[in-house]
Amino acid sequence: MELRRIAPADVREWVAKMADEGLSASRIRQARQLLGAALGTAVTDGILGRNPAAGVKVPTDRPRQQRFLDAHQVADLAHAAEQHQPGAGLVIDILAWVGLRWGELAALRAANVDPLRQRITVSEAATEVRGQLVFGTPKSHRTRTVMTPSWLADQLGAHLGDLDPRGLVCTAPKGGPMRASNFRRAVWAPALDAAGIDPGLRMHDLRHTAASLMISSGASIKAVQRQLGHTSAAMTLDLYGHLYDDDLEALADALDRRLRRGPRGPYAAQTLRRGHLDRAQDAPKPLTSKGFGVAPGVGLEPTTYGLTVRRSAS
């Protein structure tokens, strides 16, 4: 169709056709954005008077329930996958313990893995477009460095061996890049069945699993964000903030235990002498160098560590 003849109705029809063909809402949105950018350039160049893709609505993503595996389930799944295809267990472990996206793992090269420092540099991603694999930047369009557990780093070191630095870390059985569709059919589905795991689990759920394992191990939201490559900590918090509920309960319990130590605990023996705290051996030290000081107790009230006010010379 001639560029000048494209109308908003044509774009809406195109969007509806993609939806009928079963494309996901995110894929349709990306396609519409790409078309809109091209038509926007035509408007800037004076070829078109307006952008016919502007304002065309696309299907919205339906929120999917997040699913997580625990560490034992990951181990069972990796073992089952390895039985179906040599090397597939390592694929499962990287996805579940490091949190790479499938495309990032499919494009991972030996030069970007440092087993000694337990680090992986994520700089490429492979995307399947109309049956062809296209290599480009990760989803965030940024290179990032992620950590691996020491045991997994050891496995990676042994797996790499004398592999060419530009060689792919994980490949298809006959060589070449892995394809998600082939792996899902040949390894993923039968491994789920063998491990006794819900067949509805998606490969992308291993990324959610990685977030869950990191959070349960004490990782902060910022650390999880950096590991997963999210654009902001707010995005990570929106996705996985509910997993920190257990941390809040643990914090409440810790505060309760602190209070129960009460005036008869080690703080009761603290007195103020010559401007310094004569404290019991196991009491925490006040961070006076950072503006923290000690507020003396009244009667049997335990000493409270609080903020002091610094006054400038002016």
Image (cartoon, rainbow, N blue to C red):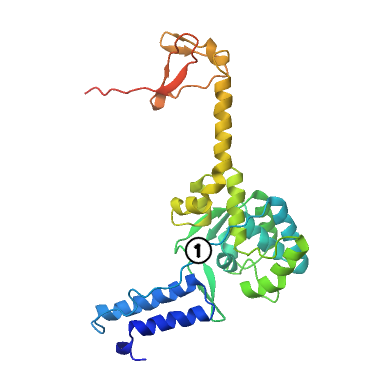
On the image, the x and y values in percent for residue 194 come to 77, 64
**Quadrant of the rendered image containing residue 56:** bottom left
* Towards the viewer: 260 or 119: 260
Q: Give the quadrant of the C terminus.
A: top left
Count of numbered labels shown in the rendering: 1
Q: Give the quadrant of the N terminus.
A: bottom left
User: Residue pushed farthest bottom?
Assistant: 1
Say whether residue 75 is left or right of residue 275.
right
On the image, the x and y values in percent for residue 106 come to 59, 68
Tell me the amino acid under the disc marked 1.
Ser
**Quadrant of the rendered image containing residue 203:** bottom right
Q: Tell me the residue at 48%/52% (across/down).
A: 238
Residue 10 seen in the figure? yes
* Towards the viewer: 142 or 261: 261
Residue 178 seen in the figure? no
Residue underneath mark 1: 123
* Towards the viewer: 112 or 232: 232
On the image, the x and y values in percent for residue 123 come to 50, 63
Say whether residue 82 is left or right of residue 246.
right
- Mark 1 neighbour class, 10 Å CA radius: few under 14, some 14 to 19, many 20 or more: some
Per the image, label 1 sits on a secondary structure element best described as loop
On the image, the x and y values in percent for residue 125 come to 53, 68
In this rendering, the answer to whether 215 lies above or below 77 is above
Q: Tell me the residue at 46%/75% (across/down).
A: 28
